[in-house]
Image (spheres, coloured by chain):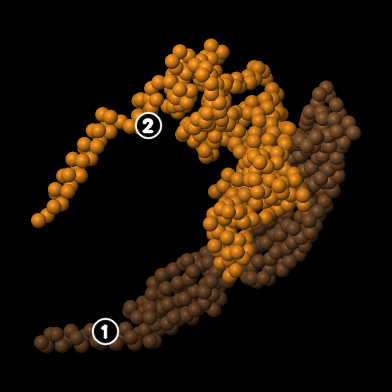
Chain colours: A brown, B orange
Amino acid sequence: MKLRSSMLISSLASTAMQFAFAQSATMTIPKTVEAGQGFTVASVGSGNATLFIVGPGQVLKRDVKLGEPADFPAGMLYSAGRYVALLEVGGAAAQTEVFDVLPVKDVANVNFLARPSRLPVGLHDAITGAVYVFDKYHNLIAAPESVSFELAHPGGAVEKRVAQTHDGAAWAAMDSTSQQGADTFTARVGDISSMRVVEQVPGDPCGLKMSAKQSGQLLDLSTDPVRDCSGNAVPDGTIVTFTEVYHGAQSTVDVPIKRGVAEVSMPIHNGATISVASGVVMGNQIGWGK
Amino acid sequence: MNKGPLIAGTLGAATIALVAIGTLWPAPSAAAYAGTHRMLGSSSTPEAAVDNLGDDIRSRNFAKAYASLANKAQFSESEFVRDLNGAYPGLLTYSNLESFQVRPLHASDSDAELQLNLHWSTVVGPEVTTRDIHVVKDGDNWAPEWPIIKEAQVPPQVIPVNYLRWDVIYRGPGDDWGTQDVEAPHVRIVDMHPVERAEGVVIMGELLNEDVVPAYVTVTATLLNKNKEPISTEGSFDKISHLLLPKQVTPFLIKFPNISMSDVGSIRMDPVSSLIAASADPVIEIADEQLHPAPDADLTGQLINQSGQVVNVAHVLGTFYDKSGNVVWVADTYTKRALLPQTPLAFDIHIPEDLAKNVASQRTVIATYSSGGAQ
């Protein structure tokens, strides 16, 4: 009975001492730390303690001697966000502090989303570019940054926009040029840039015109070189429809453009009307033998 | 008293007895379907002779069918088989004769005319072919004369084709986040009309590929009620040409069975396109298209394959317009035989009788399928 009483008293005394030590132990930690930078946690008190640092995607545990500074070298904390520092003495929390790890000020990565990757020429504000700026640890840099957008045509024409990031993002809309080609769309922040290719393709055929020539019992139909309204050659493979209407009947052929023109041979019918179209664009009509 | 074992025993015994009876004395039709026995053994009437012929074709017993013909001296057995199945792989090659009907047209003591309607089960649904068969009396029996249609043969030759083809390289798994992929083709619905039919609501229209790359397209529609809540969603399924080359237009038709227009407040259309590797060939000419008014309103014409590639199946889609240019109906058909280079093949698209009077013009498009995939 006496032994039990003495053990109980001893245990209570130990707990009380730990509580007392915990009450007297304190730490000082910077309110903000730049990602990747080293920092020091100062503490007051005596004896041993454990320091926990808990943050987004990272947990550090360090045994410290109270009264001596605890150094965290560069590169230990790299994920930006809000962290909690917990000083534990004898199994009890002595102090809890909150501090922020901020992104590095210098932009290291530019993520660039350019849409669309292919569009017709001559459209206003049809190309959009969105940029997200990150530091070298892939933290989104929320501080405003100046972003320059540049759309360069192979022919030398350049279209430029400048935008400020808001909460790490900036965007701009650009016009497609009047000339087809693979434009380079570049977003630049300082020395860091990211490039995308935007293919500008011809628009609908413009002034679609065909001619007819008799070849035996057939009529050779051929378009002039098919171009859009800006003079760009409509690409090979584009479907051109020839329709021949005669005596209450009709013949139709969908022909792909090859080497810039669409060609087909159709049977001759005197009094026939032949028309040409591509998509929703109508071309000329020819009356044969009228 | 528990009667379960007694009932089970009785049912078991009855089942065994019925199976034995069915095996020993099968019904003629069942035996005919199983291919072990002829439903009609003799050819004592013209109808029986054509029935036997149809039965042999259905059981793919072509040798027996050929042997029963009165005019077999005019063609070989292989020509007879090619007439039925096609010389080149086509729709009928991959089909079975599901059933047939025989209709007498006229008869005398020595000969008769009968119509044989063959109902084929094909990969695109049921198809019907019709042959008028002359039957002659041969002693006590009757023998059919097969109206052979010899398929045109293309002479061996080399046809140079400088065809266009599109291939696609998509972004890979190793590409960074934000790296752009190749853009899906831009397609646009250029016309759309909902109509009410006896079977329900039908939505039809036309879809344009306004891009410079080929597109694989489908169209889905969702009917919404007056409160903007969805009633039903359906797709165009095969009532569309799924492969659209640049600036090509396809009709589409979507059926909503058992729904009334009065229940519909609005319609949400959803054209979907994706990039697809494709070839610009073959080029198919649609010649001599003619609209025939009711009764038996239809669109007829001929397909001429201008390329050197054999087209195994051609899907013919007709878009019918009224005088104002509005789409009033979309209908389709499949060619039963392969489409050989430079060889005309007739087609016939049925137009509903009640709509035929509104049809003023039409436009036809062809989707082709060749061995090795859609081209």
Same-chain status of marks 1 and 2: no
In the image, residue B152 above or below residue A275? above
Residue type marked 1: Ser
Q: Which residue is mark 2?
A: B29
Element at label 2: helix
Query: In the image, residue A272 lies at what x, y percent?
Result: 83, 34
At 20% from the left and 88% from the top, the residue drawn is A9
The single residue placed furthest to the right in the displayed view is: A290
Query: In the image, residue B3 lies at what x, y percent?
Result: 13, 52
Q: Quadrant of the N terminus of chain A?
A: bottom left
Element at label 1: helix
The chain letter under disc 1 is A
Residue type marked 2: Ser
Decide which of B230, A12 is in the foreground and name it.
B230
The chain letter under disc 2 is B
Residue A14 bears which disc, if any?
1
Q: Is residue A140 visible?
A: no
For the residues labelled 1 and 2, the Cα–Cα distance comes to 99 Å
Q: Is residue B136 left or right of residue A183?
A: left
The single residue placed furthest to the top in the displayed view is: B73
Q: Quadrant of the C terminus of chain A?
A: top right
Q: Is residue A202 visible?
A: yes
In the image, residue B75 above or below residue B285? above
Q: Is residue A234 left or right of residue A1?
A: right
User: Few, some or many C-alpha atoms within 10 Å of disc 1 (few <14, some 14-19, many ≥20)?
Assistant: few
Query: In the image, residue B201 lies at what x, y percent?
Result: 59, 56
User: Few, some or many C-alpha atoms within 10 Å of disc 2 (few <14, some 14-19, many ≥20)?
Assistant: few
Q: Quadrant of residue A90?
A: bottom left
At 38% from the left and 81% from the top, the residue drawn is A93
In the image, residue A176 above or below residue A238? below
Decide which of A32, A110 is in the foreground and name it.
A110
